């Protein structure tokens, strides 16, 4: 027998029936013969797989250690622990109790996140915070009602804009959107989740744009119609697709909890607090303004809005500068800001904080479980993938799943593929 054989440590022998058994060192143990000398079986045989299934079910879906102890009373499997673990991993009953959701290599950043020399808020992400309690007045005996905060964030510069909203209807959000546009300018692209109020707003904008095209008959219609907002919706229940505004919602709540301390505010007080928090978040450092180590000035989102940090004191006016030189000073400053943004801040976005490995794509007809945070894992819906949606990198990050309740579009982080061999796997 070769010195590298897996059997050499077991000292095997043939019994009277020509069956290979373990000789071992338990000759004097007061245990049955079959436990002293278990039958040696290979790890990849079909009989071995059936034995493991039987032991796993006999131990009421026990773990690796319990299943192994049950088997070793009669059989000795080569590399038993690894073989049993691989088989238990494919147990549907155990998998449904602790399903592991799929992952995929983190996708590339969208074009608005990495485009320079664009006006702030030309590409904007929007999200709502949870309900907060507001006072109807500052006087005694006041009533309270629910209010919300609409967050707008520039995808390129991370500048934020907050609007207090009194409801979650489409009309309330349209009013907040008009206030945002009046202060920050018209945006070309709007990104959001698939919330009901955002879907309603998108329908209203499409109806208004259609009426606008039908009512005006001049040559300027195509030019004006091209200035309409193009809305981009993320897949449902996919907060990772909107991580930029989700992180800023968290930062907003961080300051709001410490300022309010649970005390209800009036609508006017909330608007004032939001303006102060907005100035703080727009003064967060992105990177240094220069490469000089002695220069402590940092680039902030406020530099793209007013040319300086919102919390910095104003510099005294320079009176001996000619009007022509003063006129060209601001564009040069803005170009310098974008240059530092492109050379320093953009490089920070290069690395992937997680999901660094490319995984096999989910395929049509795969059996999966659809994750639902409201229910325990054993009540998650069973479904089958009917369509896959690839990105620019040809990786599947979103799928359409058919369940007993209908079709759902979900990102792969909300999908758990059942460990069942499919026909295309056998053909590989």
Image (cartoon, rainbow, N blue to C red):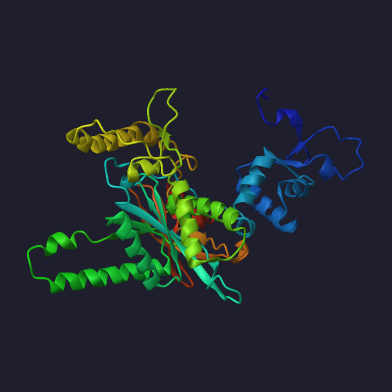
The answer to whether residue 14 is above or below residue 34 is above
Q: Which residue is drawn at 70% across and 56% down?
A: 61
When asked about the image quadrant of residue 398, the answer is bottom left
Residues 240 and 13: in front is 240
Total numbered labels placed on residues in the image: 0
Q: Position of residue 261 (x, y in %)?
A: 62, 58
Residue furthest out toward the front: 319
Residues 122 and 5: in front is 122
Q: Where is residue 20 in the image (x, y as percent from the top left)?
A: 73, 38
| Quadrant in the picture for the N terminus | top right
The answer to whether residue 119 is above or below residue 260 is above
| Quadrant in the picture for the C terminus | top left
Left or right side of 287 for 262: right
In this view of the protein, can residue 423 be seen by the observer? yes
Q: Residue at x 38, y 44 (%)?
A: 302
In this view of the protein, can residue 421 be seen by the observer? no
Q: Position of residue 226 (x, y in %)?
A: 18, 59
Left or right side of 162 for 393: left
Residue furthest out toward the left: 219
Q: Residue at x 86, y 35 (%)?
A: 26
When asked about the image quadrant of residue 157, the answer is top left
Left or right side of 156 for 266: right
Left or right side of 118 for 247: right
Q: Which residue is drawn at 44% across and 36% down?
A: 351
């Amino acid at each position: 027998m070769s010195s590298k054989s897996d059997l050499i440590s077991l000292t095997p022998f043939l019994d009277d029936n020509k069956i290979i058994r373990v000789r071992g060192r338990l000759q004097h143990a007061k245990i049955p013969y079959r436990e002293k000398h278990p039958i040696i079986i290979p790890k990849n045989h079909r009989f071995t797989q059936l034995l493991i299934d039987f032991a796993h079910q006999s131990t009421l879906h026990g773990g690796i250690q319990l299943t192994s102890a049950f088997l070793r009373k009669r059989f000795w499997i080569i590399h038993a622990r690894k073989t049993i673990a691989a088989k238990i991993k494919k147990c549907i009953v155990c998998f449904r109790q602790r399903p592991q959701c799929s992952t995929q290599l983190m996708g590339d950043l969208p074009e608005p996140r990495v485009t320079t020399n664009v006006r702030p808020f030309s590409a904007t992400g929007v999200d709502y915070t949870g309900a907060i309690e507001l006072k109807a007045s500052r006087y005694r005996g006041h009533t309270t009602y629910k209010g919300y905060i609409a967050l707008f964030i520039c995808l390129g510069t991370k500048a934020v804009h907050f609007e207090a909203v009194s409801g979650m209807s489409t009309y309330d959000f349209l009013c907040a959107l008009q206030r945002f546009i009046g202060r920050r300018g018209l945006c070309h692209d709007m990104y959001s989740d698939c919330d009901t109020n955002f879907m309603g707003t998108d329908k209203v904008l499409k109806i208004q744009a259609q009426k606008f095209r039908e009512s005006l008959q001049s040559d300027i219609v195509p030019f004006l119609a091209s200035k309409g907002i193009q809305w981009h919706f993320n897949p449902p229940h996919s907060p990772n697709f909107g991580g930029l505004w989700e992180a800023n919602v968290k930062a907003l709540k961080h300051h709001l909890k410490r300022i309010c301390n649970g005390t209800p505010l009036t609508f006017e007080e909330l608007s004032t607090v939001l303006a102060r928090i907005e100035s703080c978040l727009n003064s967060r450092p992105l990177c240094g303004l220069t490469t000089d180590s002695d220069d402590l000035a940092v680039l902030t989102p406020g530099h793209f809005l007013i040319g300086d940090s919102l919390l910095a004191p104003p510099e005294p006016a320079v009176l001996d500068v000619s009007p022509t030189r003063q006129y060209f000073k601001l564009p040069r400053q803005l170009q310098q800001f974008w240059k530092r943004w492109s050379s320093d801040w953009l490089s920070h976005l290069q690395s992937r904080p997680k999901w660094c490995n490319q995984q096999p794509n989910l395929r049509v007809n795969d059996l999966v479980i659809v994750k639902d945070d409201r229910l325990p894992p054993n009540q998650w819906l069973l479904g089958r993938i009917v369509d896959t949606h690839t990105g620019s990198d040809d990786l599947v990050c979103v799928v359409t799943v058919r369940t007993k309740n209908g079709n759902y579009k979900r990102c792969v982080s909300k999908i758990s593929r059942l460990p069942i061999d499919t026909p295309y796997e056998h053909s590989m």
